[in-house]
Image (cartoon, helix red, strand yellow):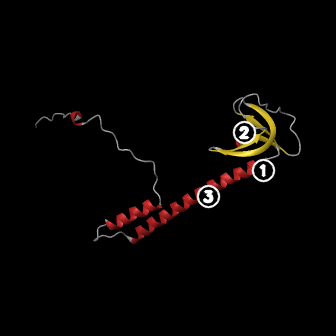
Amino acid sequence: MSDVSAVDYSSYVTSDYTLPSVSNKSLDGGDFYTLLLAEIANQDPTEPMDSKDMILQLAQFSSIENTQTLTENMSDWVDKSSMTTAASLIGNDVVYLDSESSTYYAGTVSGVTKDGDGYNVLVDGFEVPLSNVVEVYTGGTVNSTDSKSDTSSEA
């Protein structure tokens, strides 16, 4: 029996190779139909695709498309619900947590703004994230917490 020696392939590997970039784009309906048409066009004519498999693929795609539509609709509903909640606070006294100082303040809501993360209520000139509002009072002032005074240049 002859001896087998190891072969070093490291000289064949270059260190300047980089992987091709891949976008983070997800497949949509048009991509699915393009793939399905390519599959049909490139199938073996002597063994065509089973019609049951094709129907199953179409049903799966329809289900995925409906789920995506439902997700988009739910996201829109949550956004509108948050806006309605924030708008319903206008004119009411609220207690909110100031995230920077971890202190509770009280004031009257005078408006609503939207930023990338959600909605803010304007409390005595300060933008307060809706999620920081912890109490709401109607028809009376809050006595248990001091109002935040504008001592800084921020509003």
In the rendering, at what x and y percent does residue 142 appear?
86, 38
Question: Outermost residue, left direction?
Answer: 1
Q: Quadrant of residue 37?
A: bottom left
Q: Quadrant of residue 43?
A: bottom left
Task: Label 2: state its secondary structure.
Answer: strand
| Residue 73, numbered circle | 3
Q: Label 3, label 1: how many angstroms apart (C-alpha)?
A: 22 Å
Say few, some or many: other residues with alpha carbon within 10 Å of mark 2 (under 14 / 14 to 19 / 20 or more): many
In the rendering, at what x and y percent does residue 24 appear?
45, 48
* Contact (Cβ within 8 Å) of mark 3 with mark 2: no
In the rendering, at what x and y percent does residue 140 appear?
89, 42
Question: Outermost residue, front direction?
Answer: 153
Q: Amino acid at mark 2?
A: Val
Q: Nearer the viewer, residue 77 or 47?
A: 77
Say few, some or many: other residues with alpha carbon within 10 Å of mark 3 (under 14 / 14 to 19 / 20 or more): few
Q: Earlier in the sequence, mark 3 or mark 2?
A: 3
The N terminus, quarter of image = top left
Q: Earlier in the sequence, mark 1 or mark 2?
A: 1
Q: Amino acid at mark 3?
A: Asn
